[in-house]
Image (spheres, grey):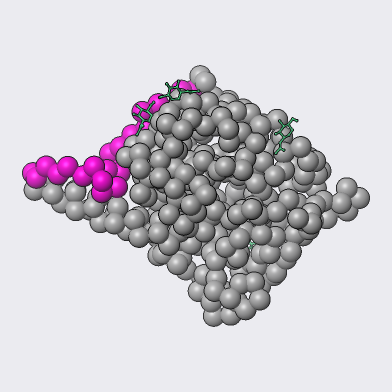
Amino acid sequence: MDKSPYARRDSRKQRYIIGVCVVVGLALALGLGIGLGNKHSGGDSGSTASPTSAPTASSLPSPASLWQPAVNVSWQIVLAQTLNIDSKDPTIKPDVDVFDIDMFTHQNTSVVDDLHRLGKKVICYFSAGSYEPYRPDSHLFNKSDLGHPLQDWPDEIWLNISSPSVRDIMVARIDIAHDMGCDAIDPDNLDGYQQDNGLDLTSLESIDYITFLAEKANAKRMSAGLKNAGDIVTNVLSLVQFSVNEECVKYTECSVFSSFIKAGKPVFHIEYPEGAPSDVTTQASRKLCSTPGAAKFSTVLKTKSLNNWVEYCNGEIAMTDVTAS
Ligand SMILES: *[C@@H]1O[C@H](CO)[C@@H](O)[C@H](O)[C@H]1NC(C)=O
Ligand SMILES: *[C@@H]1O[C@H](CO)[C@@H](O)[C@H](O)[C@H]1NC(C)=O
Ligand SMILES: *[C@@H]1O[C@H](CO)[C@@H](O)[C@H](O)[C@H]1NC(C)=O
Ligand SMILES: *[C@@H]1O[C@H](CO)[C@@H](O)[C@H](O)[C@H]1NC(C)=O
């Protein structure tokens, strides 16, 4: 089973840069009084965009009752495997504060409870913007809500994130995360507007969607993160509690995400160094760990499979125990 739909960032980045260029170009053009139709440019994401359904104060628990992870908090992410925690073992490798794990593979296991017993916080990952054929609820998706396959992951298909039916399925997923006791959700694939999605998705729809997801999660006393999607950071920064970023050093976009740090919210930052896991050079790890724009990011070095191997900026390497697959 292809369990690594997360390393698709080479194509994402190109579109991100194009999007930024178009935004800048559009701003210049507007400044000159020239109207531009840019339906397919991905550049409709200027900072004037605003969420269309911002959560109301009355519908949400007070911010104090939500988990707000601290800047520079330590973490591990394992999406390709199921953690195996020995109920008699008082420690876990690595001994970090936060674990980001695949929600469905840990449903019906005691892993979230076990992590809590060890004093850890748990972020539950699921794809919110793509159809994956191998999830227990995959049959619920309506064919009319599917767009193009993801470029690097043809198993997965972009979803119409404005569809009420898709949103119902995601509310049910948020309920699963809540029932499992997850402290937060990590909804992936919110950046379809940057891709050839086949549904004419726009960044405004993504802003509306992350607003919707964060509101639903917050109402269940769970935090929510923004995954990648650099060009909507300013629009949703106040609505989410953290960022999960892939490869901002590689693509020189860390400064975009440093707004989170300024707002007192962590950036869970992943880089995929060449040679991982066995041959990461000191030079490579130093570069990935000391980029000025990434100061105070919670950086992990991983392989693209996002398995149990992790290396940290202090040189520590760990392998979290997982079940045999
Ligand atoms: C971030 O946390 C690490 C421990 O995980 C610590 O060694 C480091 O000094 C911290 N950095 C800052 C800037 O607080
Ligand atoms: C967990 O169990 C429930 C109830 O039997 C089932 O509906 C669900 O599909 C299971 N989840 C997984 C990932 O197997
Ligand atoms: C699926 O989409 C079609 C066309 O939009 C709609 O008529 C139908 O009600 C939808 N079915 C479900 C289960 O949402
Ligand atoms: C996506 O769903 C919305 C809401 O149901 C609908 O208005 C829109 O036409 C759909 N987009 C496509 C490309 O089907």
Q: Residue at x 55, y 71 (%)?
A: 273
Q: Residue at x 65, y 46 (%)?
A: 102
User: Measured from the top left, where is residue 227 in percent x and y?
Assistant: 49, 48
Q: Is residue 278 left or right of residue 192?
A: right
- Magenta-span inclusion, residue 64: no
Q: Is residue 287 above or below residue 299?
A: below
Q: Is residue 234 above or below residue 208?
A: below
Q: Residue at x 73, y 50 (%)?
A: 82
User: Measured from the top left, where is residue 181 in percent x and y?
Assistant: 71, 35
Q: Quadrant of residue 222?
A: top right
Q: Residue at x 80, y 41 (%)?
A: 110
Quarter of the figure that contains the C terminus = bottom right
Rendered-image quarter of ligand 3: top left
- Magenta-span inclusion, residue 43: yes
Main SS of the magenta part reads loop
Q: Nearer the viewer, residue 194 or 133?
A: 133
Q: Is residue 143 above or below residue 122?
A: above
Asked if one can make out residue 123 in the rendered structure from this viewpoint, the answer is no
Q: Is residue 133 above or below residue 298?
A: above
Q: Quadrant of residue 275?
A: bottom right
User: Measured from the top left, where is residue 320 in percent x and y?
Assistant: 75, 59
Q: Quadrant of residue 319?
A: bottom right
Q: Which residues are magenta?
A: 33-57
| Residue farthest right in this picture | 88
